[in-house]
Image (cartoon, rainbow, N blue to C red):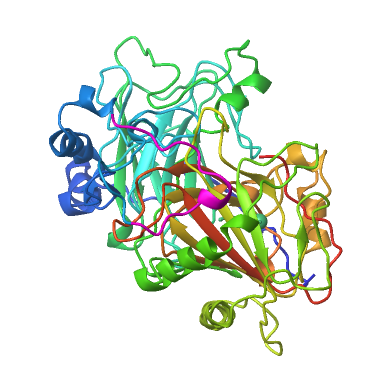
Amino acid sequence: MFGTNLILKNAFRMMSWAGSGTKRVAEKELHQRFSPSKKKQQQFCWPCPVCHRSFASYLLDDHIHHCCGPSNSLSSVFRTSPTDGPKLITTEPPSGPVSIDIFSILQSDYDTPSLPKIVNSENTIDFRNAASSEECDRPSGSCGASIQPDSDFQLEDGVSFRQKDLSVCVDRVPGSGNTAESSIENTKSLNSKLITDGLEDMIKFECNENKEVPVETRAVVARESMEQQGSAEVLKDGNGRREWPPPGFKLYQRQKQSQAKLSMFFKHVSPAGVESNSPVTVLQAGMVLFKNWLSLERQQMLVQESQNVAHLFHRPITSGGGKYHIYSMCWGPKWNPKTHRYAGVGAEQPLPDWMFDLAQEICCEAQRHTPVHPPDLKFTPDVALANFYPVKDKELGVIGIGGHQDLDDSCKMPVVSISVGDSMTFFYRRLPPLSRRKSMIYVSVDEKAAKNCVDGDTAHNREQQLILRSGDVLVFGGESRLIYHGTRHVQAGTRPPGLHMVSGRLNFTFRQTDGSLTAQHSHSSS
Ligand SMILES: O=C(O)CCC(=O)C(=O)O
Ligand SMILES: [Fe+2]
């Protein structure tokens, strides 16, 4: 729509190991130069679900033990029952024991973030400064490596791995423009391929039939800026055994491990979410994240506004006739949950002025960082959609919104999204994945980009994930207005202690309809 080419040219840049010009530096020196300080290793923190203080991931387990007593007592911590209808939100401070769903934090299942693990077993992967990109979060700029399983497979985004290939992933610091230099110790003859993709560089070392990644291989990834350097080490035992699935990976469907099926195993094992430490991050053109932007007071005001209209929250109907596992309501034009259409006349619930002002203020701020709308226009939101995500519950099943594009409203204007309450993972891609493109109507900002993507999923279209916490604000417009996005796993007990709200997450999205009041709502089933 804005004539933007979404395909990153030269996304796959071939780098020959032998001819890459990578500086060979003595191993010891590499260690000193590229191993991040202890402080950096500790950068990635998780909040304790009970006291909400943050701890380095590897300390959290211990802390929870001290904070809540022995782990068996945690199992008796009560869960909140599913909230519904008018009882959606409480303005009363919680009394009695803090309500947490400790299992969703401590246990790793396919839609629950696994705590980062640093595995040092003999025959598997030893991450010098972080964990594998596929299994958990890494501190920004760090890297992880993994030896591939005993069969060929293809990642969802079309990157294929042959047996024994090695991959090393490094977070990119958004906006830095730096790409990684790579080398692999002990190995002179492996081809390496650099796959650059938004937030991440992945270096794939290709083995051929005669050459495989030798025992005790050290892959070193160097970056131009010292800040972003790191190293990862991959160890195999003398027999070359590897653990399958790799630590932290979960096979969620036991099927014949054909090449096609293997890719399914990797579907939900990508990091639980990229956590940005900086207050403002331009994630890609037209998409900006403001961390902890909204004061607790204004978050509480949004909770209160939702409380005032709690009776209007309903479970929207999916296109298949089922019900979403979330509760929604809409300020502005009346939105019909059955037809997924705005009624257009007679606002059922007018958008409060202060919320309008807030959305406009955020949009102006976003526009200062990246174009989220045409410069000659002003964002005048007339719709605010509130979604309430209860914590995961047996009855409701998996909570979240499946991948979709927001097509109901003016695509010239951005979507301004505010998160309040428990944290949740937000995933996005530039276009729907190939598998979904066959079954859904999708829209691309740029015809050419869509055409280029038609035959496969390029690394450029790789899924990215964010953890949206209470007070975080995300704006997507301009070139990112039609991102394919959705939400998954609410992290119970992660909301700020001062926020008087039951477990779960509230999300507010402000949009401008521009009279396009009959467009079909595009949510897929959750
Ligand atoms: O909850 C969120 O962060 C996203 C909600 C969303 O995508 C939508 O309402 O269309
Ligand atoms: Fe959406």
Task: Name the residue rendered at 45%, 41% in the picture.
Answer: 271
Task: Report the residue at 58% width, 63% height from top.
Answer: 309
Q: Where is residue 285 in the image (x, y as percent from the top left)?
A: 60, 69
Task: Quarter of the image for the N terminus: give it.
Answer: bottom right
Q: Is residue 297 magenta?
A: no
In the rendered view, does 191 fall on the left or right side of 451? left
> Can the viewer see residue 456 in this picture?
no
Q: Which of 19 and 394 is in front in this view?
A: 394
Q: With respect to residue 466, does 184 lie above or below?
A: above
Residue, x 56% and y 44% (percent of image)? 84
Residues 46 and 31: in front is 46
Quarter of the image for residue 507 reads bottom right
Q: Based on the picture, tell me whether residue 89 belongs to the magenta stretch.
A: yes
Instruction: Identify the magenta region.
Output: 77-92
* Image quadrant occupied by the C terminus: top right
Q: Where is residue 144 in the image (x, y as percent from the top left)?
A: 37, 39
Left or right: residue 372 versus residue 453 is: left
- The image shows residue 490 at horizontal and vertical percentages of 47, 44
Choose between 405 and 308: the one closer to the eye.
Answer: 308
Position of residue 498 relative to residue 61, above or below, is: below
In which quadrant of the rendered view does residue 10 lie? bottom right
